[in-house]
Amino acid sequence: MTTVVWFKRDLRTRDHAPLVAAANLGEPVIALYVIEDDYWQQPDTSGRQWCFIQDSLDDLNKQLRKAGNQLVVLRGSVIEALSELKASHAIERVFCHQETGGQWTFERDKSVIEWCSEHQIEFREWNQFGVVRRLKDRDIWDKAWTELMRQPVLEAPGSVPLAGAIQSVAWRGIEPGATAADRCPDRQTGGSIRGETLLTSFLERRCVGYQYNISSPNTAVRACSRLSPHIAYGTVSLREIYQQAKAAGNHSNTLPRKQKSLTSFRSRLHWHCHFIQKLEDEPELEFRAMHRELEGMKSGPNDSERLQRWQQGQTGWPLVDACMRSLQHTGWINFRMRAMLMAIASYQLWLHWRDPALHLARLFTDFEPGIHYSQTQMQSGLTGINALRIYNPALQSQKLDPNGEFIRRWIPELAGVPAEMIHTPWLMTPAQKAKFGGNTYIAPVCDHEQAARAARKAVGDFRKQHVSREETDRVLHRHGSRKGPHQTRPKAVSKQPPDNQLSLFD
């Protein structure tokens, strides 16, 4: 009797309940990963994500070999892979983790469950995040999350019985879908070893001042944990990160400043799952507004020139363009800047949320569907229960990059412009441009202050005319945050987590 352990976004052996359960049976195990070409044709996938997965598959295979097993990688649909394995190895069980992904993965998982049922194969899923499938009452979610995080971390199995020989594809030689043109050479490296190294350095040194240093793109590169892609693809478990962070904060030698930083970090792990739960509860959020009546606020095709300039980092607003160019080059930027990029697209540029959301998804090496679609809608004012955040790109630049260091790094056109002028180069005189440079930097796509006022008025007018209390209450009841298991309803429609607690985007 052979068990297939199907790896998805859980590319590790430590704290991996399906693998441990399979190993404990003492029967042959096939550790399976399937390269699904149809998945890599989806509009929110990219080559940088696949490259991170390739790194992680390399590392996962090394971990499995230490336990006497090996990773089997097949290409095609999961049902095709399972059918092939059933024919050659008479599989009896399929064990895996639950995945809260987009509509495509949701339908894929349902098909796999149906196939297993038709062929009398046991199918069993485990939860790896604090996300509750078929959650009946949001009021109990906080308690369920806490209980899961407190469960013991599972050690990697020392021995995993190997099934008979299976021909595996060479995953390093494959570029599925349309991923070849997006290698992102400065992206983060995948794999559990790298993830654990990052966790150790963060807990030992980099976490101090975390809550203060994660907003600026200058300090966030080091101050943030940088674990987000490892959490997204499961090379290190969220529970292990949480428990190690808690232990480090509770150590008798830990200074109060470090304790506060780690408390802030742990709260973001909680918010991470809070936002994924939204997509788990309502998968349609990938395609339509959370507050259904707000979906009609913007109609018609997006302004193609505005969308393209935003995508290329050519809006004429230095911090916005620097963030986009940095993201294109590295696959990562801190959350505050992600929120600003989406808000600028939604308000000043008045773009429908879907095109910008898909573009950012492709750029994020750490793309996590549940967080991404919930957050892009929040930053676009489509939840109906959160206050609008309309970012002023000049003020954000002056606050978060006062000396223009980040801007100069990513916008060489402004390399010689002094700090007092670099945030608003469109105000420079011809003489100043001749002296300091900046002649080649593009003019702003529009007057951002005027555009922000127009957007705020348009949103306000639409809400007054088209938004009902009934729909707002529905969103609050289904998706609103709760302070604890005994609070039955949120008390205010405008409250939301502060900027440094919106989600684990670091």
Image (cartoon, grey):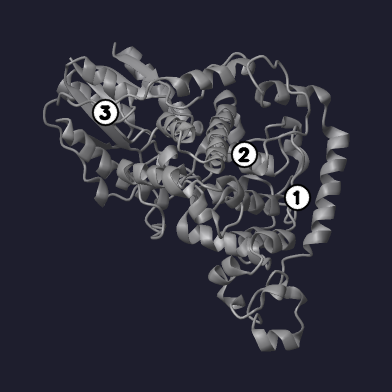
Residue 303 location, x and y as percent? 69, 57
Q: Is residue 176 above or below residue 406?
A: above
The residue that mark 1 highlights is: 390
Local crowd size for mark 2, using a 10 Å CA cut-off: few (<14), some (14–19), many (≥20): many
Q: Secondary structure at mark 3?
A: loop
Q: Which residue is mark 2?
A: 502
Residue lying furthest left: 165
- Between circles 1 and 3, the one closer to the viewer is 3
Where residue 68 sits, quadrant-wise, is top left
**View extreme (front): residue:** 253
The amino acid type found where label 1 is placed reads: Ile
Residue 156, label in figure: 3
Mark 1 vs mark 2, foreground winner is 2
| CA distance separating discs 1 and 3 | 46 Å
- Residue at left offset 67%, top offset 36%: 497
Q: Are marks 1 and 3 in contact (CB under 8 Å)?
A: no
Amino acid under disc 3:
Ala
Query: Which of marks 2 and 1 precedes in the sequence?
Result: 1
Residue found 66% across the figure and 78% down from its top: 418
Pick the front one: 86 or 422? 422
